[in-house]
Image (cartoon, rainbow, N blue to C red):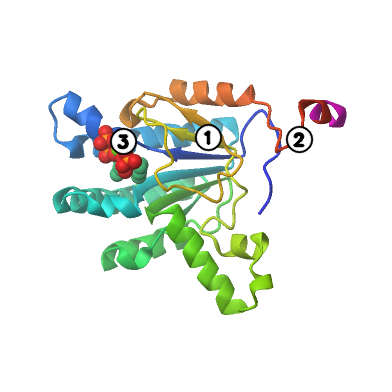
Amino acid sequence: MQRPTQTAVPRHVAIIMDGNGRWATARHLPRMAGHSRGMDAVRSVLETCGRRGIEYLTLFAFSSENWNRPPDEVSTIMRLFMAALQKEVGKLVDNGVRLRIVGERISLDKELQRLIVDAESRTAANDRLHLTLCVSYGGRWDIVQAARAALRESDRPEAITEAALGRHLGLSFAPDPDLLIRTGGEQRISNFLLWQCAYAELYFTHTLWPDFSSAAFDQALAWYAQRERRFGRTSQQLAANS
Ligand code: IPE
Ligand code: IPE
Ligand code: MG
């Protein structure tokens, strides 16, 4: 895994897309209307990534814990996800976006698994923007599955290094996120990229996900550009090296 370096534009942005339900409830709409409107925000963020030259965008779409929601809501979210895969993949292909889905696939519906394999293979040759959707994903699940995979290669305790685990994590193809955004007002990680966000800059906004516009994203990027990323060192050391 590469350690992120200081640049004005983050290479990798990860987003916890929260607040869909509250957005809908405030309008006396079913929660699903919020999830559906959330798709528009995804399109707009993708477009901004293209304009700003962001290379990796990772979106938290459904957590390991979200399986505990009412079955109706879970199945409607999954249906929306399937419909979006069918409808949007052609556009991703045209725009040079490589799509990956990371999470515990075995827990997903067979038809959804098939659509995922198809979408990933159709976009596999693209490299302009790497879009990753975390579905049925939890940071703890990721670390445990990586540890198991590393142990399958070697059961010597010394073989379990940061690099060896990193190779088996769901996001092994990407540098660590530089910027983690959470919409919806909560200031917590909710089991997202626990390992990978060791040095991410954390940006929390009260804006609900369906309202997260290009302008709101630009604000987060402007905030990021002002951070001094020290990675444990001192400001003086950074100044001496620049
Ligand atoms: C995020 O919005 C989407 C998912 C977790 C699937 P929420 O559905 O959590 O919306 P709020 O937090 O209840 O408003
Ligand atoms: C986090 O949102 C998960 C996703 C955005 C997919 P939640 O709404 O599930 O998080 P909590 O339950 O408020 O921590
Ligand atoms: Mg929520």
Residue labelled with disc 3: 38
Q: Who comes first in sequence, dot 1 or dot 2?
A: 1
Number of residues whose C-alpha sits closer than 10 Å to that of mark 2, classed few (under 14), some (14–19) or many (20 or more):
few
Q: Who comes first in sequence, dot 3 or dot 2?
A: 3
Ligand 2 lies in quarter: top left
Q: Residue at 44%, 22% (x, y): give it.
A: 216
Q: Amino acid at mark 1?
A: Cys
Instruction: Name the front one of labels 1 and 2.
Output: 2
In this picture, is 165 found above or below 233? below
* Helix, strand or loop for disc 3: helix
Image quarter in which the C terminus is found: top right
Q: Position of residue 241 (x, y in %)?
A: 85, 32
Q: Amino acid at mark 3?
A: Gly
Residue span colored magenta: 238-242
Residues at discs 3 and 2 in contact (Cβ within 8 Å): no
Q: Position of residue 177 (x, y in %)?
A: 57, 42
Asked where in the image residue 104 lies, by quadrant, the reply is bottom left
Is residue 114 in sight in this rendering? no
Q: Amino acid at mark 2?
A: Arg
CA gap between label 1 and label 2 equals 30 Å
Is residue 201 in sight in this rendering? yes
Of 155 and 100, the residue lying toward us: 155
Looking at the image, residue 179 sits to the left or right of residue 45; the answer is: right
- Chief secondary structure of the magenta span? helix
Of 111 and 69, the residue lying toward us: 69
Residue labelled with disc 2: 233
